[in-house]
Amino acid sequence: MNILIMGAAGSGKGTMSKKIVELYDVPHISTGNMFRDAMRAETPLGLQAKKYIDKGLLVPDDITIAMIQERLNQPDCQKGYLLDGYPRTLVQAVAFEDIAKKIGKPVQIVLNLSVELDALIHRVIDRRMCENCKAIFNLEYLPPKVENTCDYCGSTLVHRSDDTLDQLVVRLKEHVFLTKPVLDYYGYKGLVKYVDATKNIDLVWLDVKAALEKVQ
Ligand code: ADP
Ligand code: ZN
C-alpha cells in the first residue's frame, strides 16, 4: 500500500501513522522525524534543518527532496510506504511523482486529517514526544502513565522546540500557503480522503481504517 498522510501541525498524523504501520506492513517515513533524528545526531543535514525548523519554517525543497529520494530508494519501500509530512510544497509533489514512478510505487490514497484551529493549539502546546520510539502524548488529553516517561519504551519525553505558540503560527501559515496547494493537486487526481480529525483518537482511527480498507 502506498499512502500519503497530510494535515496541519497537531492534526494527528504521527498518532495515526503509528496505528497504520501496526496494521499494514509498510515503512513509516516521516520527514519531521528524519529531520529531528538528524538534529539530535548533529549531522550536517540536522544542523541545516535546525535553522528552519526552530523558526517554524519549512526546510528548503532541495534538501528535503534529496533526503526523501534516498529514503524511498531503500529496499523496504518495495513493500510500499506511509509518507508522513511529505510532499509539503508543489515542488516536492512534482519531484515525488518522478521518484514514485521510478520505484514503481504510485500513491494510492492521500489521507487528509482536518482539525479546528483552537483544538490544534492545545494539541501542539501540550504535546510531548518520545524521541526513541516516536510515540506521542498530550499532557491534557493523553498523559503518559508515569510523568514525563514513554509508556512504550520508558524513554524520557521531550517538548519539541517548535511546539510553541509563536512557531505554531508560522507553521500554520506555511501550511496554508505552501501545503494546501498540494492537497488541491491530489484532489484533482481524486486521491484525497478527508477525515474529520477533531474527534477522539479511536473514532478518527475507525475512519482512517475504513478509508484504507476501501483501497485494497
Ligand atoms: P508537524 O506536522 O507537527 O508540523 P513534522 O514533524 O511533520 O511536524 O515537521 C516538523 C518540521 O520539520 C516542519 O515544521 C518543517 O520545518 C520540517 N519539515 C518536515 N517535513 C518537511 C517537508 N516535507 N518539507 C520541508 N520541511 C519539512
Ligand atoms: Zn518511546
Image: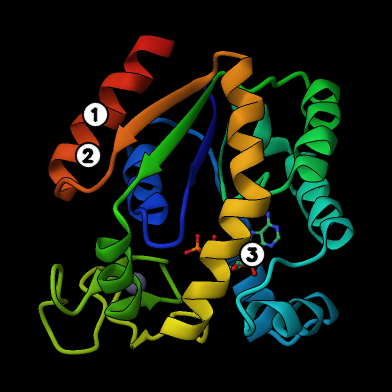
The disc at residue 15 is none
Instruction: Report the amino acid beneath label 1.
Output: Asp
Q: Are marks 1 and 2 in contact (CB under 8 Å)?
A: yes
Q: CA distance from mark 3 to mark 2?
A: 25 Å
Tell me, yes or no, whether the two marked residues, 3 and 2, touch with CB atoms within 8 Å: no
Q: Residue 204, which numbered label?
A: 2
Determine crowd level at label 1: few under 14, some 14-19, many 20+ residues with C-alpha closer than 10 A. Answer: some
Residue 77 place in picture, x, y as percent: 66, 34
On the rendering, which quadrant does ligand 2 occupy? bottom left
Confirm whether residue 164 shows in the render: no
The answer to whether one can see residue 64 in this image is: yes
Q: Which residue is mark 3?
A: 34
The amino acid type found where label 2 is placed reads Val
Return the mark for residue 207.
1
Q: Secondary structure at mark 1?
A: helix
77 versus 51 height, above or below: above
Q: Nearer the viewer, residue 155 or 81?
A: 81
